[in-house]
Amino acid sequence: MKLRYFLIGLLSLPAAAQTTRTVQDLQLWPEAQAELALPGSDYLLLAARGERSTSAGVSRALGFDERRLTLGYEHFWNERWSGGATVRYIAYGGSHDYVLPELLLRHRSPIGPLTFGQRLSLERSFPVERLSGSGKAEGQTWVRLRLDLEKQLPLGRISLRPRLSYEAATHLRLQKAETDPNERFIQFTSARVELGCQLFEQFDLTPWFAYRTNYFITEPQYKEVNGVLVQTSGGKLNAVAPTLGLELRYTFLNGRKGSERQQLPTQH
């Protein structure tokens, strides 16, 4: 019996060490934003986004699989440091929706002709039961870090803003219970490229493309081959979601000039 278990473990090691990568159907994320300019470069933000997969047979209210509404505020202490808070309401169309409050700290500094940005945030999700008797859903706490590089390119009356960003997120658990599933250290990343277009002082249009990846540890599955159990699946899984987005932002300048403000990209 000991030899049998040893063979099972030995044969499963290569499969467990491997990482499986899957690529989902393209997702479409249109978003409309309204920004209210406050004294200095401070702002209030209201944003509405719809998310839809291009896979066949997907149909939800308003044509979206997921809808989210964001309200945010950010205060600038100086040209480099700012901080603020957001709250998001996410509707999945299932038994639960979610409310996600977030606290953020941002730093931006020049690197030659480029601007380097860092955004660190702490986020907590709170489930909202939509269907009675659907069971309890657990909230989670997330730590997110985003790095980005961008450059402003004035072209006559318009301005272009090419930008690259990379975000990583980890699920924060102060104490792991025995029943909690195993997790990888990083559970989510997003690599995004965009081209912001400021068509006039109050209106920005930003098309973007991203590879968003969720990192899982799945339960192993076995089958018997010649009297020996062999692991056929399970282990580390990288689920990639290519995403194409378009963000439209209108800024209410509130009697101010756009040139007097330090306005952030549409990816706040």
Image: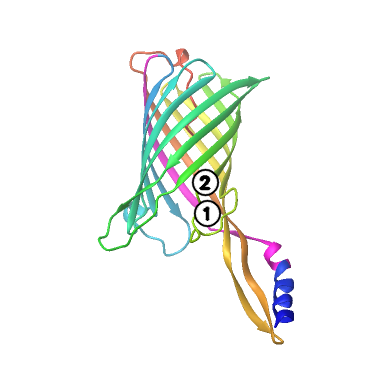
Disc 2 target residue: 244
Does residue 153 belong to the magenta stretch?
no
Q: Which residue is drawn at 37% across and 56% down?
A: 137
Viewer-closest of 58 and 203: 58
Q: Does the residue at mark 1 contact the one at mark 2 (Cβ under 8 Å)?
A: yes
Q: Spatial distance from mark 1 to mark 2, Cα to Cα?
A: 7 Å
Amino acid type, residue under disc 2 in the picture:
Leu
Q: Is the magenta stretch mostly helix, strand or loop?
A: strand
Task: Residue 67 in the image: state x and y as whole percent.
Answer: 37, 48
Q: Residue at x 43, y 53 (%)?
A: 52
Q: Quadrant of the N terminus?
A: bottom right
Q: Quadrant of residue 74?
A: top left
**In the picture shown, does residue 6 fall above or below 85?**
below
Write down the region rendered in magenta. Answer: 14-39
Amino acid type, residue under disc 1 in the picture:
Leu
**In the picture shown, does residue 76 fall above or below 133?**
above
Tell me the tag on residue 26.
Answer: 1
